[in-house]
Image (cartoon, coloured by chain):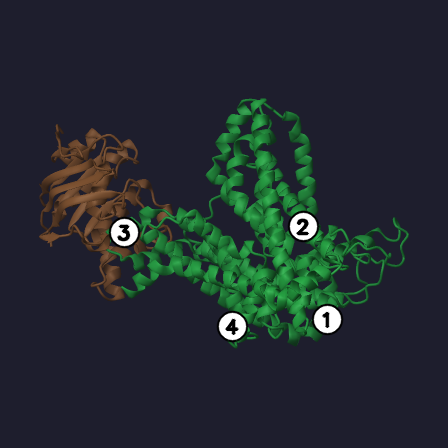
Amino acid sequence: MSGPLHLQDLRVTRDGQPIVALNLTVGPGEVLTIMGPSGAGKSTALAAILGTLAPAFRLSGHIVLAGRDITALPPHLRRVGLLFQDDVLFPHLSVGGNLAFALPPDIKGRAARTARIAAALQAADLSGFADCDPATLSGGQRARVALLRTLLAAPCALLLDEPFSRLDADLRAQVRGFVLDRIRREGLPAILVTHDAEDARAAAGRVVTPLGLPLAP
Amino acid sequence: MIMAGLLRQAPRITLALLTVPVLAGLAGTVIPAFANDAKGIQALLQWPGLPRAAGISLVTGLGSAALSLAITLLPVASLWGTRAFAAVQHLLAPLLSVPHAAAALGLAFLIAPSGWIARVLSPWATGWTQPPDLLLLNDPFGLALTLGLVAKEVPFLFLMALAALPQTDAARRMQVAQSLGAGRVASFAVSVLPSLYRQLRLPFYAVLAYSMTAVEMAMILGPTRPYTLSAQVVIWMADPQLTGRATAAAGALVQVGLVLGALGLWHLAERLAKSALIGLAHRGMRGQGADGPANVIAALLGGLIGGGLVFGLAGLALWSFAGLWSFPDAVPASLNLNTWTRAAPDLAQTATLTLGIAALATLLALALVLACLEAEHRFDLVPGAGALWVLYLPLLVPQVAFLPGVQVAALRAGMAGHWLAVAAAHLVFVLPYLFLSLAPAYRAWDRRIAVAGAALGATPARVFWHLRLPMLLRPVLTASAVGLAVSVGQYLPTLLVGGGRVETLTTEAVALASGGNRRLIGAYALLQMLLPALGFACALLLPAWAFRHRRGMAVAA
């Protein structure tokens, strides 16, 4: 179930001050980049699309994803995936447990679920890591598990909240390549929030500010 | 949907559960004082012991509370951030879990004329071959009582101080003040104490109110001619004649007045201390000379308190296994299991009932506290300052001033004397402690985990059961152990609401205290102490075992 992400006159204000103003469409496989200094409303834009805005904010306009108006839905029904700055793996679960948490319940039977997780790990060069403690993984491995977890939940769109900023320089290009490649292959509309021009160039899509002004990539 | 509605109401329901019994109980307790032309008040005023009983209440209460505060703050000032401080932290939970009655009995065994200290010093230093005829326990000035109260309240205040310290930015403030040339203690007093005290105020008020009105400690360690006012109120309450109840009601009324008066006095002292502190800061006090003496005093006082508790409790244990142990031998001539085997059936039955009541009260309190905190998280509720006062209400209002009213209500409902009623009464006391223990960890939980869960399609309920609760297993179990310890230690609610028919380890230990059977007292007190200790052991070991393969769940060092 894939399709474009429409932000129709999406406006977020706080105390009357506009913080986010976006009116655009992100196509399947496209990565839109939102850039701006910290505190400029990048995270607010993501929270608006995720459905986790704090009550102090006011939202108007519509968010339409794959033909569904998700503006009023609670976060867990929106089918919007998210990658954080850190991997935010669940520390009390194994790598496999983290992935199983994301796997939709309609994949039934222990064997089927285990097989699905093993296949996902194998495709990411992480075969045999299912029983591992996430805390023992390297930074690059953790980032890949986080992406796998997000994709296994079968989202219709992906939000990336500066997901590469905490990685070392050489690891950064590698993980970034892995993530962007998977997004294009899955044909998901994606929004990347970053303050790093190199991330924006690698995303190779349009670049805008939180208030919708276009920036040169 | 129904569940979500119920969850949203959880804070209100919980606050009502705390206020209604306390306020209604207070009214029910005090009103009989005015019945029949205020006969109760007249009787109280004619009682010759009143001035002294009230005075002792005030002096031991204020004295022990102030001393507890000082003993709490000194090590924080002089040791915070050092290795010794970390060691002290680990001792806290076990000390905190010791019920008041057990602590008092242990102390009594230590300092009585025939107690351990006298035995160790006799006859070589004192020349005593018989226990001396000295009023070391139950002294008329309430010194033994003060000591006991301090030993019990310091761990509580200390724990509260530890919870508040991170919010005061203490490390950086101390660094700045010390880099300006101030000594450690002076840096602490000027830069950290004001914001720390603001958060310690309510816990301290609770300690003050409790110290003035504690019943079981006063009965074991306090003066007897007259008793402290709160102990005397309980004695009147047990009077089969109705006039006793009226006098007790009048006594409870005076007790409330005394507590309010003491709180007022303390508030005045707060203001004086504040302006004194500002004055010292203005004069650029460096106070470097204060550090050495402060360190010594902190070590001495801490050692005295910790040592008193530990040796007192060890004495209890030793007595329960003692064969012949005549004065002035420092240790018993032989050890055996006679006391335990003889009392085993009674002990087992009493311990089971105690544990059942504690488990029920703790489970209910835990469910309510989790519902409150989860509602706060899901609906972005911000608890006001008023909510905190309500939480402390059962700890601020003297127990003797509202439990008798609760007892009457339980009698009318035909519930008095049933263990379920006792568990319900315990809930009122377990709830605040459990909340105070769990809330910081619950609120500090990484909210991004919840966002990550929701983005993966998990409902709020699934996030709670599969992510938040397992990740908070350690604090949840620790808070439950605190709740268990609070319930096991309850004396007055058990005595009154149980109508003397519900016998727990605590009521039995206190009842035995006036008799002379040290071996049996030791056995009951030891068991009374063991139940909470087991709870804390579970809270420590269970998460360690469950997460043995999860490095990310290890305790932050």
Instruction: Work out how far the residue at label 1 is from the one at label 4, CA to CA, in angstroms.
Output: 30 Å
Q: What amino acid does circle 4 point to?
A: Leu
- Where residue B294 appears, x then y in whole percent? 66, 34
- Where residue A91 appears, x then y in whole percent? 37, 50
Which chain is the one coloured brown?
Answer: A
Quickly name the residue at label 4. B420
Q: Residues within 10 Å of mark 2 (few under 14, many from 20)?
A: many
The disc placed on residue B339 is: 1
Residue A199 visible in this rendered orientation of the protein: yes
Q: Chain of mark 3?
A: A
Labels 3, 1: front one = 1
Image: B286 above or below B217: above
Labels 1, 2: front one = 2
Q: Quadrant of residue A115?
A: bottom left
Q: Residues within 10 Å of mark 1 (few under 14, many from 20)?
A: some
Q: Chain of mark 1?
A: B
Q: Earlier in the sequence, mark 4 or mark 2?
A: 2
Quickly name the residue at label 3. A127
Q: Quadrant of residue B13?
A: bottom left
Question: Do the dots labelled 3 and 2 sit on one chain?
Answer: no
Which chain is the one coloured green?
Answer: B
Instruction: Work out how far the residue at label 4 is from the one at label 3, CA to CA, in angstroms.
Output: 55 Å
Instruction: Work out how far the residue at label 4 is from the one at label 2, CA to CA, in angstroms.
Output: 35 Å
